């Protein structure tokens, strides 16, 4: 076989494999969309509480912030131990780390029809 023919066969094979891979990815993605059972009222409440913490973290940290942290803490990790400082406040650096984990937790679990806990 000539080098040109071998090259043509390799390129055709690569294009075919890439096409199959892309098609398979699309099928998987569409199945995931169909099987997602996201509780939209939970989503609204969860993100309302995250936003509340974000708005209050650099202000006076009172009951509203603690209530939001308690809500979030029912579902994912909140570093409550970090509030054991002299001022009894939730440090902003800890918040940034926790928030990243909260958002990752939500993305990972959102399609499981998360229910409110008492």
Image (cartoon, rainbow, N blue to C red):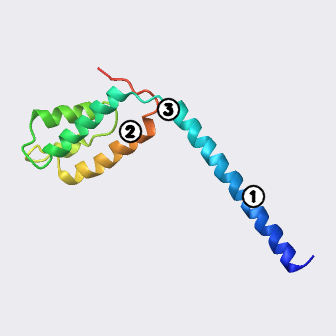
The residue at which mark 3 appears reads as: 36
Q: Residue at x 72, y 62 (%)?
A: 15
**Position of residue 53 in the picture relative to residue 26 (left or right):** left
| Residue 93, percent from left and from top | 22, 54
Residue nearest the viewer, comparing 84 with 45: 45
The residue at which mark 2 appears reads as: 106
| Residue 68, percent from left and from top | 20, 34
Evaluate whether residue 23 shows in this view: yes
Q: From what the image shows, is residue 20 above or below residue 38?
A: below
The residue tagged with tag 3: helix, strand or loop?
loop
Q: Nearer the viewer, mark 2 or mark 1?
A: 1
Q: Disc 2 or 1, which lies upstream in sequence?
A: 1
**Position of residue 39 in the picture relative to residue 5 (left or right):** left
Residue nearest the viewer, comparing 15 with 61: 15
Badge 2, how many Cα within 10 Å: few under 14, some, many 20+? some
Q: CA distance from mark 2 to mark 3?
A: 13 Å
Evaluate whether residue 73 shows in this view: no
**Position of residue 68 in the picture relative to residue 105 (left or right):** left
| Residue 56, percent from left and from top | 13, 43
From the image, which quarter does the N terminus lie in?
bottom right
Q: Disc 2 or 3, which lies upstream in sequence?
A: 3
The residue at which mark 1 appears reads as: 16
| Residue 49, percent from left and from top | 23, 35
Q: Residue furthest bottom?
A: 3
Q: Residue at x 22, y 41 (%)?
A: 51
Q: Are marks 2 and 3 in contact (CB under 8 Å)?
A: no
Q: CA distance from mark 3 to mark 1?
A: 31 Å
Q: From what the image shows, is residue 9 above or below residue 34?
A: below
Q: Quadrant of residue 117?
A: top left
């Amino acid at each position: 076989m000539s080098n040109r023919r071998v090259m043509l066969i390799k390129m055709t094979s690569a294009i075919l494999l890439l096409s199959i891979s892309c098609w398979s990815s699309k099928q998987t993605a569409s199945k995931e969309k169909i099987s997602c059972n996201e509780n939209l009222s939970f989503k609204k409440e969860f993100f309302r509480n995250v936003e509340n913490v974000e708005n209050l973290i650099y202000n006076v940290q009172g009951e509203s912030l603690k209530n939001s942290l308690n809500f979030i803490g029912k579902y994912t990790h909140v570093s409550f131990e970090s509030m054991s400082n002299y001022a009894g406040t939730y440090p902003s650096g800890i918040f940034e780390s926790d928030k990243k984990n909260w958002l990752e937790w939500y993305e990972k679990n959102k399609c499981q029809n998360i229910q409110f806990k008492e």
